[in-house]
Amino acid sequence: GDSVTQMEGPVTLSEEAFLTINCTYTATGYPSLFWYVQYPGEGLQLLLKATKADDKGSNKGFEATYRKETTSFHLEKGSVQVSDSAVYFCALSPNTGNQFYFGTGTSLTVIP
Amino acid sequence: NAGVTQTPKFQVLKTGQSMTLQCAQDMNHEYMSWYRQDPGMGLRLIHYSVGAGITDQGEVPNGYNVSRSTTEDFPLRLLSAAPSQTSVYFCASSYSSGQDNSPLHFGNGTRLTVT
């Protein structure tokens, strides 16, 4: 069945460091891919999305490219800030059916 | 712009008690769903609905009931609470199902503890 695997956390980085959070997926066909962010005490918010192969989603300095050949959607940011501290979830939405599938989440802490 | 509103924010139940978690959205979204979030397990789908009068089971439906009498509301009922249902519950909605790439919009969650 469809599923998402993302790197285990927690991840701790110094401010201005480079961030990569790995995400790979299993799905039939051509799913849409998403990254969500969850700040403490809040619900998940959409960070970025990509709907077809080679699409690059971007928002707030974060980027992720839909790689069908490696079934990956890794999240990157060139210079993290303390305010980026949160839990990040990779998710997919199949092109058939009515369900979204989420990874287990990666906790990021950025220290000054 | 309220978005997705969940109530209550916190709840403590004793084993065997029943309760309803409320979820309402004001975006005229057809698709609504309930997830539970547990440490190390990410989000797991409990039930979902693709429109008023239509509901279906997700990955972990046992012990929960839902109904969808209006487009706006999608309550989640725990009939007889068990400690295994201690979790954070999120309601999420979308313009339609994932087939048109619409993202999910989440509420702020209900933290439930069953003793």
Image (cartoon, rainbow, N blue to C red):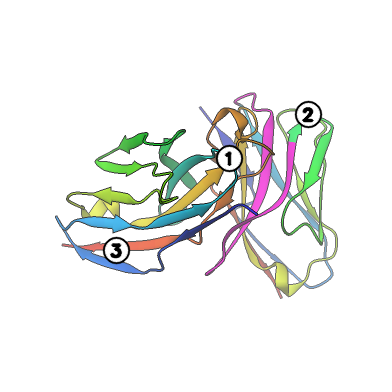
Mark nearer the N terminus (1 vs 3)? 1
Q: Is residue A106 above or below residue B105?
A: below
| Quadrant occupied by the N terminus of chain A | bottom right
The residues bearing labels 1 and 3 have C-alpha atoms spaced at a distance of 35 Å
- Range covered by the magenta-colored residues: B27-49
Query: Callout 3, which amino acid?
Result: Thr
For the residue pair B32 and B112, the one nearer the viewer reads as B32
Q: Is residue B37 above or below residue A27?
A: below
Mark 3 lies on residue: A109
Q: Position of residue A29 (x, y in %)?
A: 58, 40
Q: Position of residue B23 (x, y in %)?
A: 68, 41
- Res. A43 visible in picture: no
Find residue A59 and report its image quarter: top left
Q: Residues within 10 Å of mark 2 (few under 14, many from 20)?
A: few
Describe the element under mark 2 as helix, strand or loop: loop
Q: Residues within 10 Å of mark 1 (few under 14, many from 20)?
A: few
Numbered disc in front, either 2 or 3: 3
Describe the element under mark 1 as helix, strand or loop: loop
Mark 2 lies on residue: B70
In the displayed image of the protein, which residue is found farthest to the front?
A: A69
The disc label shown at residue A7, or none: none
Q: Position of residue A10 (x, y in %)?
A: 36, 69
Magenta span contains residue B40:
yes
Question: Tag 2, which chain?
Answer: B
Mark 1 lies on residue: A29
